[in-house]
Image (cartoon, rainbow, N blue to C red):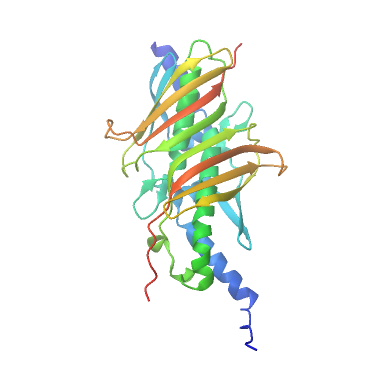
């Protein structure tokens, strides 16, 4: 994707108050796929004993990234809303590390986009979580 | 005829239960970050997500962010589950809630998976959630949670999650 679309999408994501509150930024964009990074922060901690971030923060990242993947799809760029999202938590994210999500639309119909996503920390071969979701497709 | 022991004064019971709930909730930074609090009536908990601008996803509508909603539901489910298995220990006096602090929190259940259904968009106002433990075994638990805003029967989101229960430490004799 060209620089201009990347810049527009970046600005869009950073304008979402909740995504901004979690420090999310777009790191890659292709038609129908997106990558978003969320830096570690103490306010995201879910287990004070270990410093591991809360699953809910990973859910928020997955949801944002899924929505960005749908909006980057050439057939669905007018907006989207999540219909459902399932997250599998495979392991705890390592405290101190940025969590990056990658989402891809694996099928898009006239009305629905089906999305898969993964979340990784520095150990990129060992995902922290996986997600599947259905998103609405809004057309002009 | 054996006489029933005299019930404890109401303030003592309430103070013990509220202290246990506070210990469970206050130690978690992310719960504080989202602004979630819990109301307790007997053993029934209601989670409250106080409206804040940082919870907004789409500023054009405006609507609550799907991620904030998912996190709210997951927090409500985990606290309900922890509360339900701590309840017995608290009531019997096996756990003294005054000894619980952020460094000595009871081990929390771990989320295995969590599925959220978005039923309608979240309006920019307070939201409430109540969770129900449908099954709680020795190792796994299944929890359902429902969220609403103005009208209890008009849910705006619901979720089901599976959780791995913490290893139970036997009470020391």
Q: Say which quarter of the image contains residue B159.
A: top right
Give the x, y percent position of residue A60. Answer: 48, 35
Give the x, y percent position of residue A105. Answer: 45, 19
Q: How many marks are shown on the rendered structure?
A: 0
Q: Say which quarter of the image contains residue B106.
A: bottom left
Please tell me which residue is depicted at 52% across the width and 10% down the height of the picture: A75
- Front residue of A41/A77: it is A77
Residue extending farthest front: B1
Give the x, y percent position of residue B28. Answer: 45, 53
Q: Is residue B16 above or below residue A81?
A: below
- Front residue of A116/A94: it is A116
Q: Is residue A24 above or below residue B42?
A: above
Q: Say which quarter of the image contains residue A35.
A: top left
Please tell me which residue is depicted at 56% across the width and 44% down the height of the picture: B144
Please tell me which residue is depicted at 58% across the width and 44% down the height of the picture: B145
Query: Which quadrant is home to the N terminus of chain B?
Result: bottom right
- Front residue of B62/B117: it is B117
Query: Which quadrant is home to the C terminus of chain B?
Result: bottom left
């Amino acid at each position: 994707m060209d620089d201009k679309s990347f810049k527009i999408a970046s600005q869009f994501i950073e304008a979402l108050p909740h995504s901004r509150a979690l420090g999310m930024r777009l790191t890659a964009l292709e038609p129908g796929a997106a990558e978003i990074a969320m830096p570690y922060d103490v306010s995201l901690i879910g287990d004070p004993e270990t410093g591991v971030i809360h699953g809910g923060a990973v859910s928020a990242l997955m949801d944002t990234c899924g929505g960005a993947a749908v909006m980057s799809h050439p057939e669905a760029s007018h907006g989207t809303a999540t219909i459902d999202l399932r997250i599998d938590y495979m392991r705890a994210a390592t405290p101190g590390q940025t969590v990056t999500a990658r989402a891809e639309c694996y099928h898009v119909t006239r009305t629905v986009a089906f999305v898969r996503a993964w979340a990784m920390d520095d150990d990129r071969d060992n995902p922290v979580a996986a997600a599947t979701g259905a998103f609405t497709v809004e057309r002009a | 005829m054996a006489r029933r022991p005299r019930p404890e004064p109401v303030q003592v019971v309430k103070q013990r239960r509220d202290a246990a709930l506070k210990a469970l909730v206050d130690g978690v930074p992310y719960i504080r970050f989202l602004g979630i609090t819990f109301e307790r009536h007997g053993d029934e908990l209601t989670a409250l997500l106080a409206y804040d601008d940082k919870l907004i996803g789409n500023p054009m509508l405006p609507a609550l962010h799907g991620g904030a909603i998912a996190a709210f539901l997951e927090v409500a489910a985990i606290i309900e589950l922890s509360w339900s298995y701590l309840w017995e220990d608290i009531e019997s006096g096996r756990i003294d809630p005054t000894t619980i602090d952020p460094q000595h929190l009871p081990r929390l259940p771990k989320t295995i998976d969590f599925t959220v259904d978005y039923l309608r968009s979240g309006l920019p106002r307070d939201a409430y959630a109540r969770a129900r433990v449908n099954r709680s075994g020795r190792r796994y638990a299944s929890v359902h949670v429902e969220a609403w805003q103005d009208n209890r029967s008009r849910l705006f989101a619901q979720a089901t999650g599976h959780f791995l229960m913490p290893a139970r430490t036997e009470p020391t004799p």
